Amino acid sequence: MTTRVFLAFSILEAVLIGAIFLLYPKITRHGLLFGVYVGEEASSGAEARRITRSWYRGMVAWIVASVVVGAALGAALSHPAAAVVPPLLLLPGFLVLYLLAYRRARSLARPGDPPPAVAVLAEGPVTTALFPAAALAVAVASGLFAVAYSWNVYDLLPDRVPTHFGLSGAPDAFRPKSFLTVMLSPLLTLVVGVGIAGVAWLTARAKRSLRYPASRASMIAQARFRRAMTRLLCWLSLIVSLFLTVVSVSTVRVGLGRAETLPPAVLVLAAALLVVALGGVVSIAVRYGQGGARLEETGTGARLTNGLADNRHWVLGMFCVNREDPSFLVEHRFGLGYTRNLGNAKAVALVGGFVLVVRALVILALAAT
């Protein structure tokens, strides 16, 4: 029964994520085509439509294949681990289809020098850092509480501690007590919550890529999009911090014999995290579009400027490498949100270091179960 439940959730997740991938060409800034700046006119032309239609057909076929293969493996293996197959299968299909579309879009790339940068003379809407600061404070407090609580009762824990829980909340795996098995979850709570809140703070100050001559309308659209992305990341940080804190503290309480199972709040928070993450992404994509694309006055023919319109600084249309730009985060060319400027050593060290730490902790957590 547990395997079927996990598999059902996994298939639903794969369908939702696939639908988001399917949306990407619809939400991209006008003038961009699969990571390539082709100009505003070419991005609406016949060849661009053919490339986009191929993307839609390929993604639909890949989503169906991922679901079918995942369901077949889940039925054959009868193990909860098979539930991760459908979402994981989406990624290679997405990458292959994207690279094929990117290669075709390169032939439409705008010739000549990139459009000149636009300097904003008038003040526009400001994305406040108050919410990111509050989310960061909560993440730090929650993480430190989880670490302090686990460390304080470490000596009271028995020789074997729970390291995994079933869908009912009851422990189904135990390991010998060690610093790794007891303190890993609290440390993950601190690092992940603080990391997401930190990205929210950086997003609130991310670089704006405007249009000219309609730079005022583009600036307002960018500001509204950036506020929406910042709010989503802040809410995710708060929910993740609360979820991981409850899991961490409850795991210790079960180990101490003060509780028999994880509380129902764990499942409630896990469901809330999934709903907020996927629902927030879809809502922003549909309402705002990438970078506020749905709010911009596209009918004016205003062209994109700044680094977003400069093909020289984008590798495969996904990775920004601009050593002349001091920005940490820049707008995605294909996708939703912001990405690192790999030409900025500080951005690479900060964001890359966070990703490596989280991955290391996750690997250690999996090894400890």
Image (cartoon, grey):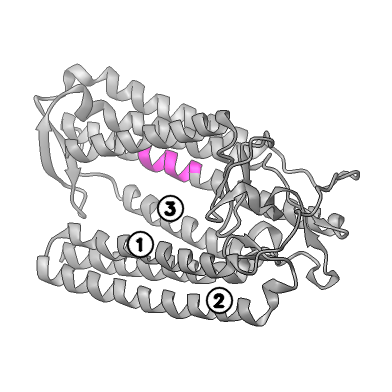
Query: Observer-nearest residue: 266 or 70?
Result: 70
Q: Which mark is residue 273?
A: 3
Picture disc at residue 55? none
Magenta span of residues: 237-244
Q: Position of residue 68 (x, y in %)?
A: 26, 76
Q: Is residue 115 above or below residue 140?
A: below
Residue 250: tell me if it is visible: yes
Of 300 and 289, which appears nearest the observer?
A: 300
Q: Is residue 260 visible?
A: no
Q: Which of 362 and 107 lies nearest the eye of the viewer? A: 107
Q: Amino acid at mark 2?
A: Thr
Circle 1: element type: helix
Residue on which the image places disc 2 = 52
Secondary structure under tag 2 reads helix
| Sequence-first disc among 3 and 2 | 2
Q: Point out the tag, 1 or 2, that comes first from the N-terminus.
A: 2
In the rendered image, the vertical position of residue 264 relative to residue 78, given as above or below = above
* Amino acid at circle 1: Pro
Helix or strand or loop: what does disc 3 sit on? helix
Separation (CA) of disc 3 from disc 2 = 32 Å
Q: Position of residue 194 (x, y in %)?
A: 48, 33
Q: Which residue is mark 1?
A: 92
Main SS, magenta residues: helix
Residue at x 64%, y 60% (from the top left corner): 290
The nearer-to-camera label among 3 and 1 is 1
Q: Please name the residue shown 26% across and 38% down the image.
A: 363
Q: Residue at x 75, y 65 (%)?
A: 295
Measure the C-alpha gap from mark 3 to mark 1.
Answer: 25 Å
Mark 3 Cα-neighbour bin, 10 Å: few <14, some 14–19, many ≥20 = some
